[in-house]
Image (cartoon, rainbow, N blue to C red):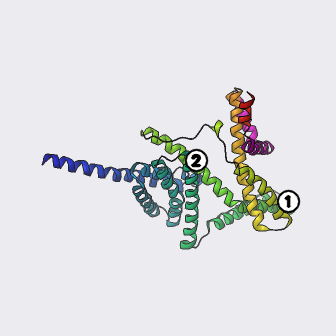
């Protein structure tokens, strides 16, 4: 009888561990989500790390408990925040945590984990936007544009009170409107970029937490060893052709697609160029202070940013580091 009771106790304890883990992480996720929602300036920054809570449950206890933790977080966040805001927040970030958790649990390699997490992030944003439109009749993209227009009107009114002429105000309005229209055209690329940043930040933090817990997890390669697919070099070339045809032949959809492709390729080239630059500075033993100055100069100088990006795109195609090793 005593042995049976001990066995029963062990089974109940084993069954209670997933529930306890999911409960603690769900409570932490809800508190974190509410803090992010009620701090508008930090919502996106804090939201990018929110999937780690769901991913931890999924890695330790499995997908079923991860889904339950996400569902409980959704219900509690809706309860303590406004329904639209709470649902939009959780639906936007929960898929990233679930997919990353599953891929980490399966010991998937780094590249597949990042790609899978980025796709899940995009799917989550699309689901949240669709939910907002269907249930509440609100388009989050249109809300952002209207808010930008209101902000622009307030800014122009302030300029008018400071004595700016109507001609200058109209020029400022025209330039601001052009920038806003360009921003709307580039929304697909911006969402893709935000998804990549989100999943990378979650990946790094999740790996560190798992290592603290004694769970092995594959890490990112050293930044000096990063090498992006040659697809981005081809994308850059085709995007330039698309921009030319879209502009000269007045093909709106081609122009927008090419513009988004150009932005994606440009960012990929910038990352690759910075990786090459870091490799060279490390090889020639450039001091940390000088490296910081160089990076600041690149960030503050748009022309140098373009040079680094173009260099990175050529490095993707020709692999300068390999050629450097061959000459040595």
Nearest to viewer (mark 2 / mark 1): 2
The region drawn magenta spans 290-319
Instruction: Determine whether the residue tagged by mark 1 lies in a helix, strand or loop.
Output: helix
Q: Residue at x 67, y 45 (%)?
A: 228
Picture coordinates of residue 321, whole percent (x, y) = 71, 35
Q: On the rendered structure, is 56 left or right of 284? A: left
> Could you tell which of marks 2 and 1 lies nearer the N-terminus?
2
* Picture quadrant where residue 316 is located: top right
Q: Residue at x 16, y 46 (%)?
A: 3
Residue 314 in the magenta stretch? The answer is yes
Q: Is residue 160 visible?
A: no
Picture coordinates of residue 239, whole percent (x, y) = 77, 57
Q: On the rendered structure, is 311 left or right of 116? A: right
How many neighbours does mark 2 have within 10 angstroms: few (below 14), some (14-19), or many (20 or more)?
A: few
Please, is residue 276 above or below residue 127 in the view?
above
Instruction: Determine whether the residue tagged by mark 2 lies in a helix, strand or loop.
Output: helix
Tell me the tag on residue 238. Answer: none
Q: Residue at x 52, y 43 (%)?
A: 205
Picture coordinates of residue 223, whole percent (x, y) = 63, 38
What residue is shown with label 2? 111
Q: Residue at x 81, y 63 (%)?
A: 174
C-alpha span from label 2 to label 1: 50 Å
What residue is shown with label 1? 168
């Amino acid at each position: 009888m005593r042995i049976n009771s001990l066995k029963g106790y062990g089974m109940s304890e084993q069954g209670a561990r997933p529930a306890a883990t999911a409960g603690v992480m769900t409570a932490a996720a809800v508190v974190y989500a509410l803090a992010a929602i009620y701090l508008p300036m930090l919502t996106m920054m804090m939201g990018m790390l929110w999937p780690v809570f769901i991913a931890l449950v999924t890695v330790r206890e499995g997908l079923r408990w991860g889904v339950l933790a996400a569902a409980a977080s959704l219900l509690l966040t809706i309860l303590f925040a406004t329904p639209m805001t709470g649902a939009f927040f959780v639906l936007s970030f929960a898929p990233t945590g679930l997919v990353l958790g599953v891929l980490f649990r399966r010991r998937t390699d780094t590249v597949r984990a990042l790609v899978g997490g980025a796709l899940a992030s995009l799917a989550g944003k699309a689901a949240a936007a669709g939910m907002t439109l269907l249930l509440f009749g609100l388009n989050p993209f249109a809300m952002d544009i209207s808010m930008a227009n209101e902000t622009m009107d307030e800014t122009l009114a302030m300029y008018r009170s400071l004595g700016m002429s109507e001609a200058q105000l109209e020029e400022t309005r025209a330039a601001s409107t052009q920038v806003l229209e360009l921003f709307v055209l580039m929304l697909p690329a911006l969402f893709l970029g935000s998804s990549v940043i989100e999943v990378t930040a979650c990946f790094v933090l999740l790996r560190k937490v798992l290592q603290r817990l004694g769970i092995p997890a594959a890490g990112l390669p050293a930044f000096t060893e990063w090498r992006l697919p040659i697809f981005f070099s081809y994308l850059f070339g085709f995007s330039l052709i698309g921009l030319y045809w879209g502009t000269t032949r007045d093909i709106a959809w081609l122009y927008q697609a090419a513009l988004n492709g150009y932005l994606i390729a440009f960012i990929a080239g910038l990352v690759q160029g910075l990786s090459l630059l870091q490799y060279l500075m490390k090889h020639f033993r450039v001091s940390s202070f000088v490296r910081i100055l160089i990076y600041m100069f690149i960030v503050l100088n748009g022309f140098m940013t373009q040079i680094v990006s173009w260099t990175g795109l050529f490095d993707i195609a020709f692999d300068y580091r390999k050629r450097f090793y061959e000459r040595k």
